[in-house]
Image (tube, helix red, strand yellow):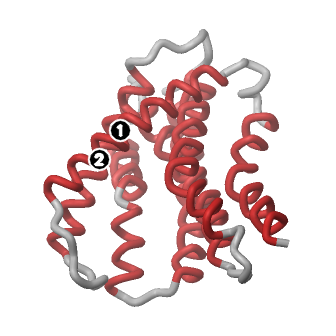
């Protein structure tokens, strides 16, 4: 029963990444190499973030919300944006379209994040004798993170690769990218500042990820239309 629960949680956490790759044109255009490169960039970015967090943040004695500490975390979190910029603009990719490039980068980014932050807790905790919903919720949170990562990659693609985008959409693109990039700080405030429980936070993340995905898709579609 414990291994069955572990495999269920693992499939919920990592399965959508494989489904997304195989169910979209990414598999047809063989963009696996691009996703792997993006995952490696994520690991390097995570190492830089870890060093910055250890250097600039103090260890809190309680789990209360500290605005100064959370602001520092949010600023350090923008290292992810720099990493995505490098993955989208500096890595050599196969001859794939901009549409497929940002999806492959976002997919690799989200998969590396799930492996780094959720594989070990799953292996240790989900095989326990007592059933808990926490790891199922972590799997759902990984799905929301997948949508967030692809949305942020799409917005980054519009910011850095799309030159002829409508000027009226530029502030919206940057605002949406800022919201997605600071989502960890937003959820931290909901948990520590407002006292939301984990299921409610995950529900918020799932709903917000779908909203941001819809907005990103609309922005990407609008920027692809020929200017009149």
Q: Which mark is residue 45?
A: 1
Q: Nearer the viewer, residue 159 or 190?
A: 190
Instruction: Answer above or below: position of 88 versus 196.
Output: above
Q: Residue at x 17, y 62 (%)?
A: 57
Q: Which mark is residue 91?
A: none
Secondary structure found at label 2: helix
Residue that sits furthest to the front in the current view: 129
| Image coords of residue 119 (percent x, y) | 60, 54
User: In the picture provided, is 147 more to the left or to the right than 72?
Assistant: right
Q: Which mark is residue 49?
A: 2
Residue that sits furthest to the bottom in the current view: 195
Image quadrant in which you'd find residue 34: top right
Q: Residue at x 37, y 88 (%)?
A: 194
- The answer to whether one can see residue 228 in this image is no
**Label 1 with label 2: CB-CB less than 8 Å:** yes
Image quadrant in which you'd find residue 184: bottom left
**Category of crowding for the residue at label 2, using alpha-carbon neighbours closer than 10 angstroms: few (below 14), some (14–19), many (at least 20):** some
User: In the picture provided, is 3 more to the left or to the right than 14?
Assistant: right
Which quadrant of the figure contains the N terminus? bottom right
| Image coords of residue 148 (percent x, y) | 53, 53
Image quadrant in which you'd find residue 102: top right
Q: Nearer the viewer, residue 39 or 101?
A: 39
| Image coords of residue 137 (percent x, y) | 64, 72
User: In the picture provided, is 151 more to the left or to the right than 122?
Assistant: left
- The answer to whether one can see residue 171 in this image is yes
Secondary structure found at label 1: helix
Mark 1–mark 2 Cα distance, whole angstroms, equals 6 Å
Q: Residue at x 51, y 24 (%)?
A: 37
| Image coords of residue 40 (percent x, y) | 47, 30
């Amino acid at each position: 029963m414990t291994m069955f629960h572990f495999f269920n949680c693992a499939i919920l956490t990592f399965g959508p990444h494989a489904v997304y790759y195989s169910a979209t044109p990414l598999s047809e255009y063989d963009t696996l190499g691009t996703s792997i490169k993006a995952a490696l960039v994520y690991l390097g970015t995570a190492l830089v973030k870890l060093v910055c967090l250890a250097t600039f943040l103090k260890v809190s004695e309680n789990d209360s919300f500290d605005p100064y500490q959370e602001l520092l975390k949010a600023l350090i979190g923008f290292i992810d944006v720099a990493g995505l910029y490098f993955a989208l603009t500096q890595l050599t990719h196969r001859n794939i379209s901009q549409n497929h490039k940002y999806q492959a980068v976002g997919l690799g980014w989200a998969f590396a994040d799930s492996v780094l932050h959720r594989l070990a807790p799953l292996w240790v905790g989900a095989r326990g004798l007592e059933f808990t919903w926490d790891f199922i919720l972590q799997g759902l949170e990984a799905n929301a993170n997948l949508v967030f990562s692809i949305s942020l990659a799409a917005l980054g693609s519009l910011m850095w690769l799309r030159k002829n985008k409508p000027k009226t959409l530029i502030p919206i693109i940057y605002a949406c990218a800022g919201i997605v990039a600071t989502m960890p700080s937003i959820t931290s405030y909901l948990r520590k500042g407002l006292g939301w429980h984990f299921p409610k936070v995950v529900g918020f993340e799932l709903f917000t990820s779908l909203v941001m995905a819809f907005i990103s898709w609309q922005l990407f579609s609008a920027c692809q239309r020929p200017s009149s």
